[in-house]
Amino acid sequence: MTDIATQVAGIGALAEPVRRALYEYVVAQPGPVGREAAAADVGVPAHKAKFHLDRLVHEGLLEVEFRRLSGKSGPGAGRPSKLYRRSEREWAVSLPGRRYDLVGHILADGVERAAQGVSLDVALRAAAADAGTTIGSESSGGTLVEALSTQGYEPRVADDVIVLANCPFDSLAQRHTELICGLNQSFVQGVADGLGCRDREACLEPEPEQCCVKVRPRGV
């Protein structure tokens, strides 16, 4: 997951009107476009369009490719043109942090497992645990608090207990509390296990205005 500073900087680049207009033009086209076409559509000089388009590339909102528009190759075909297209990166900023994409993947994985003959509850718990384990494994070298921070939990440590101040699946948890809280517990335990924190246990301890899970020293 891209850190929030990077996401805010990228999306913030669209606050400039000309830059936003150029971005909207590029992404509306069926294929990559050159700066001249973009400049003409927006009504700015080509050099100004290039400045803003390259800023959008720098922020990760657009990508660049080089291609001869004539389709010719070899000597005399001319230099390839610099063309702009929408970046494949997805952007979303939510405050407080939400991870509905993550819970969506977990639910889809769980349903696929259940279709193979496993009970739905077991399948969903296993899918959540495996998703957490993967994230924990990819966070090797970091701490459990840091890993959970990247997923939007806003963890805080109090008396050796990790309190999760935010639920990344909040609106779903309000409507489907038992299901989502169970997935949260399995996911958080998976993150701990993936990091090798076998001495930590994710416990269901619901409290108002925070995630239903707390992470305690195992056996305490």
Image (cartoon, rainbow, N blue to C red):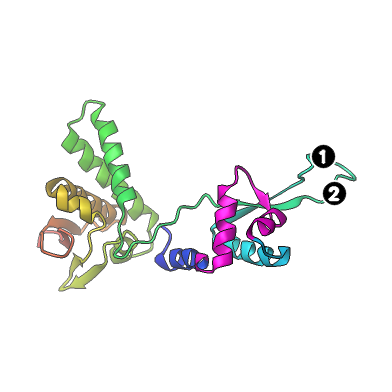
- The residue furthest right is 76
**Quarter in which the N terminus is drawn:** bottom left
Give the mark nearer the N terminus: 2 vs 1: 1
Looking at the rendered structure, the kind of residue marked 1 is: Lys
Q: Which of these two is toward me, 204 or 46?
A: 46
Residue nearest the observer in this picture, 144 or 218: 144
Q: Tell me the residue at 30%/38% (across/down).
A: 108
Which secondary structure is most common in the magenta stretch?
helix
> At x 26% / y 58%, what residue is drawn?
197
* Whether residue 123 is situated above or below residue 175 in the rendered picture: above
Q: Amino acid at mark 2?
A: Gly
Left or right of residue 25, residue 143 in this image: left
Sort mark 1 into few (<14), some (14-19) or many (20+) by Cα contacts within 10 Å: few
Q: Which residues are magenta?
A: 14-42
> Which quadrant is home to the C terminus?
bottom left
Secondary structure beneath label 1:
loop
Is residue 44 rendered to the left or right of residue 181?
A: right
The reply to whether dot 2 and dot 1 touch (C-beta < 8 Å) is yes
Q: Residue 122, located in which quarter of the rendered image?
A: top left
Q: Residues within 10 Å of mark 2 (few under 14, many from 20)?
A: few
- Decide if residue 133 is in sight here: no
Q: Report which residue position mark 2 lands on.
A: 78
Q: In the picture, residue 112 is in which quadrant? A: top left
Mark 1 sits on what residue?
A: 72
Q: Position of residue 97 (x, y in %)?
A: 31, 62
**In the image: residue 4, left or right of residue 61:** left
* Residue pictured at 75% horizontal, 51% vertical: 81
